[in-house]
Image (spheres, rainbow, N blue to C red):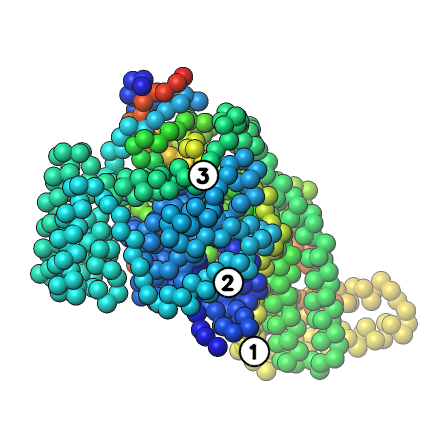
């Protein structure tokens, strides 16, 4: 039984994730690369004789040190020395995909090329001679179509065979980088080998290339290892750079790239043959782009797609949501009937079932949202959204790819700011990244959806979908405006390059979409079972203790006793009118007692203390408690409001939906609802997001965001409440 | 070969050939990573609704870049 590690590298949009899923099935484990928040997926498979660990590397076009993804991929190859690397390539764009392969070959790691998407190649009329490619590149080449599992087993077998044959030995590719660089590189190699400089990890020629390319990461490591030699190499690179700049008007890194492409071109001309007659054929994808990115139609269609996603989610999602609601309602009722009255029943019914049920009730919504977003992502449409929106984003000091963090955070409602903030890693300008991190949590994340949904259902029942659309667009507007303000004040600076692939439109695969949706949904549900369960219990305790002193309870009891005996007397004589009157009186006493009880608790005291200030925005003490809880996780706003209102009322009404209770509360007006929507949209992100923000930027920046956003949120909520109250 | 112009000024569907790429550092690296090097044949297939960025068709695939980045690329017009 042998153990092998296989790395999967490849460009973005080459079907790498599909290939990884096809190779590993459901046996995946998701973690983070050490020190960074780039997602690391590992899958373990067993064949008859071998146990293989498959590591999915981040999708990159190159192995430079400009992005965290590229560094992670490169360091994995260098530090962990996998037995084999599979480079998954979009064979339809073989030339560009070979650019990454050549860089892996320069390093020398045993390489298997997976020529993926062969179906598209055949459809386009091209012909690829993969045997010739193997011969010219000295690598194993396997043709695959990952989306229907074609060639997967051959690819795996080729990889294991290569691993067994190479036994960890690296054979770096030696190509010429031209008459100017070659002599310098040879001299560098000699010096590097003489002092065994970094040679325990990487080939000497590779180190030389990286010095010529002025690769920051390698140079820094080199300086720490042997500063004298490092300085010498840096000087050599600088000198030849000045020379090539003068004579060829190009820096060494540009020359190296040119020669790599030259090498690739020499391979391509013998490997790929293009159809002669089809030269002017407009591809289906280009035809679709004529409509989908059209000056007028494009933005209209984009808006329509976002709207359709809402409609589908809400109309379809309502059905399973109803089932879940009844299940949790039934569980609550059953627990109430079985358990004796007291703290335990209160804990289970109000703390656990209501709290967790309120959150899990939204799982169908989140599933539907992600089903559609994953499909859009896989189809290539999200890249078109970035393309169409970049001009707008640039105005606000952001980048077209900021659209991805925004959408993942909930730009199309239902995302989550945690992966959204993580997605800012694709932004390489620190300034644009900081701005995006700050404002991405304004988007309507899956946890805010229930809050907005509950409020719109209560106060705008006839226009729920339209109001939800307005909320989402409002979040975008606020995010963009705040980003602009940030980019012209505390984080000024130039914008980063927007050079991005527009992948051809593809039909998303059911498996890919389902796996993605499952991952996201599970992430959300797991949060409900852990963090939110804990918080629900904590909040229940805060809203139950300390209890009213004995004499207050006795006093309410004393008020009630004479009325209760009167009721009994009247029931016997059958005087209906007076009976109803009396029962109303009892209810008033009950409610007053309940309210006093809740106000007496820790939460009540906090909420009441904040009320004089929050009143400006129309928030009562119950809202205050909910919003404080919302810092832990936004969905807690709903469950806490639910608990706060149900604790304040009598048993019979407990199953009544929260929306109806809010409408019935005379102190909670439409103006309060609007102010609450605005405040929830903008105030401090949940603490999980804050931790992620700190990890992606710094604690100072995360603190800025919490304080800045909450101040802004309160200011706008007050303005909205005051203005709306004046008009309504 | 036709006259040399800046990529920004190229019209939609003109056949072009890249003559030089001047950006250095990260911008240059990014442009070259995507296969935009001297000798490559390209044509502009479309512009975003607000005329920026542009969609550029290479032999095998499509990419997009901003006008301000296209300023670093000079091209020759092969055919109108």
Disc 2 and disc 1 in contact, CB within 8 angstroms = no
Q: Position of residue A569 (x, y in %)?
A: 85, 75
Classify mark 2: residues with Cα within 10 Å, few (<14), some (14-19) or many (20+): few
* Residue at x 53%, y 45% (from the top left corner): A118
* Residue at x 42%, y 27% (from the top left corner): B44
Asked whether the viewer can see residue A492, the reply is no
Chain of the residue that carries numbered disc 1 in the rendered image: A
Chain of the residue that carries numbered disc 3 in the rendered image: A
Q: Tell which circle, 2 or 1, labels the residue nearer the N-terminal end.
A: 2
* Residue at x 43%, y 46% (from the top left corner): A132
Disc 1 and disc 3 in contact, CB within 8 angstroms = no
Q: Position of residue B29 (x, y in %)?
A: 29, 42
Q: Is residue A399 left or right of residue A301?
A: left
Q: Position of residue A182 (x, y in %)?
A: 18, 46
Q: Kindly indicate whether the residues beneath marks 2 and 3 are on one polypeptide chain.
A: yes
The CA distance from mark 1 to mark 3 is 80 Å
Residue identifier under label 1: A547
Q: Tell which circle, 1 or 3, labels the residue nearer the N-terminal end.
A: 3
Residue identifier under label 3: A272
Q: Secondary structure at mark 1?
A: loop
Looking at the rendering, which quadrant does residue A231 occupy? bottom left
Q: Is residue A180 left or right of residue A648?
A: left
Classify mark 1: residues with Cα within 10 Å, few (<14), some (14-19) or many (20+): some
* Residue at x 52%, y 74% (from the top left corner): A49
The label number, if any, that marks residue A157 in the structure image: 2
Q: Secondary structure at mark 3?
A: strand
Q: Kindly indicate whether the residues beneath marks 2 and 1 are on one polypeptide chain.
A: yes
Q: Position of residue A161 (x, y in %)?
A: 46, 64
């Amino acid at each position: 039984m042998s153990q092998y590690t296989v790395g999967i590298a490849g460009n973005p949009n080459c079907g790498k994730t599909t290939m990884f899923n096809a190779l590993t099935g459901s046996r995946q484990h998701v973690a983070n690369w050490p020190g960074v928040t780039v997602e690391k997926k590992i899958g373990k498979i067993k064949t008859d004789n071998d146990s293989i660990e498959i590591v999915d590397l981040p999708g990159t076009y190159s192995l430079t040190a400009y992005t965290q993804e590229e560094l992670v991929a490169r360091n994995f190859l260098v530090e962990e020395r996998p037995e084999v690397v599979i480079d998954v390539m979009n064979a339809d764009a073989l030339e560009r995909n070979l650019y990454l392969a050549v860089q892996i070959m320069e390093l020398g790691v045993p390489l298997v090329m997976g020529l993926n998407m062969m179906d598209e190649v055949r459809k386009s009329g091209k012909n690829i001679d993969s045997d010739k490619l193997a011969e010219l590149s000295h690598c194993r080449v396997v043709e695959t179509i990952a989306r229907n599992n074609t060639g997967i087993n051959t690819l795996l077998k080729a990889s294991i065979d290569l691993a067994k044959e190479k036994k960890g030995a690296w054979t770096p590719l030696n190509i010429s980088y031209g008459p100017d660089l070659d002599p310098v590189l040879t001299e560098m190699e000699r010096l590097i080998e003489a002092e065994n400089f970094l040679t325990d990890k990487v080939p000497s020629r590779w180190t030389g290339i990286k010095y010529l390319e002025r690769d920051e990461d390698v140079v820094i490591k080199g300086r720490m290892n042997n500063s004298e030699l490092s300085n010498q190499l840096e000087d050599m690179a600088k000198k030849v750079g000045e020379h090539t700049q003068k004579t060829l008007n190009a820096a060494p890194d540009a020359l190296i790239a040119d020669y790599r492409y030259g090498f690739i071109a020499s391979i391509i001309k013998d490997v790929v043959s293009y159809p002669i007659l089809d030269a002017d054929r407009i591809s289906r994808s280009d035809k679709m782009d004529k409509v989908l990115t059209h000056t007028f139609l494009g933005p209209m269609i984009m808006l329509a797609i976002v709207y359709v996603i809402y409609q589908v989610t809400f109309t379809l999602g309502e059905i399973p949501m109803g089932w879940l609601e009844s299940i949790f309602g039934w569980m609550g009722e059953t627990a109430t009937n079985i358990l004796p009255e007291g703290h335990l029943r209160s804990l289970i019914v109000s703390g656990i079932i209501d709290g967790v049920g309120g959150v899990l009730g939204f799982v169908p919504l989140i599933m539907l949202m992600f089903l559609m977003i994953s499909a859009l992502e896989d189809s290539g449409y999200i890249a078109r959204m970035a393309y169409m929106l970049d001009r707008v984003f640039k105005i606000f000091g952001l980048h077209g790819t900021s659209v991805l963090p925004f959408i993942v955070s909930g730009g199309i409602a239902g995302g989550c700011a945690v992966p959204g903030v993580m997605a800012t890693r694709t932004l390489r300008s620190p300034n644009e990244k900081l701005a995006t991190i700050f404002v991405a949590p304004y988007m309507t994340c899956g946890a805010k959806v229930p809050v907005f949904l509950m409020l719109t259902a209560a106060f705008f029942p006839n226009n729920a979908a339209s109001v939800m659309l307005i909320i989402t667009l409002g979040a975008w507007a606020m995010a963009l405006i705040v980003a602009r303000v940030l980019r012209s004040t505390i984080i000024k600076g130039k914008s980063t390059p927007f050079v991005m692939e527009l992948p051809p439109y593809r039909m998303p695969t059911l498996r890919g979409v389902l796996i993605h949706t499952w991952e996201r949904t599970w992430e959300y549900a797991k949060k409900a079972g852990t963090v939110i369960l804990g918080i629900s219990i904590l909040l229940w305790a805060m809203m139950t203790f300390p209890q009213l002193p004995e004499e207050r309870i006795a006093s309410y009891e004393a008020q009630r006793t004479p009325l209760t005996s009167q009721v009994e007397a009247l029931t016997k004589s059958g005087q209906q009118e007076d009976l109803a009157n009396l029962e109303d009186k009892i209810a008033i006493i009950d409610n007053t007692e309940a309210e006093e009880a809740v106000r007496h608790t820790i939460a009540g005291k906090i909420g009441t203390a904040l009320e004089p200030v929050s009143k400006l925005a129309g928030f009562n003490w119950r809202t205050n408690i909910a919003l404080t809880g919302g810092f832990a996780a936004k969905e807690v706003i709903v469950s806490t409001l639910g608990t706060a209102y149900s604790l304040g009322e009598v048993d019979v009404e407990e199953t009544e939906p929260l929306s109806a209770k809010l409408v019935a509360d005379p102190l909670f007006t439409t103006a309060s609802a609007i102010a609450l929507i605005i405040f929830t949209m903008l105030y401090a992100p949940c603490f999980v997001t804050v931790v992620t923000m700190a990890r992606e930027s710094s604690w100072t920046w995360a603190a800025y965001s919490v304080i800045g956003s909450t101040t802004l949120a309160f200011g706008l909520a007050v303005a909205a409440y005051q203005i709306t109250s004046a008009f309504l | 070969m036709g006259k040399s112009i800046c990529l920004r000024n190229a019209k939609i569907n003109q056949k072009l050939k890249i003559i030089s790429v001047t950006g250095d550092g990260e911008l240059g690296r990014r442009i070259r990573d995507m296969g935009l090097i001297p000798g490559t044949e390209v044509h502009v297939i479309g512009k975003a609704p607000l005329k920026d960025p542009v969609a550029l068709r290479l032999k095998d695939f499509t990419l997009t870049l901003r006008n301000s980045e296209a300023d670093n690329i000079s091209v020759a017009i092969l055919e109108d």
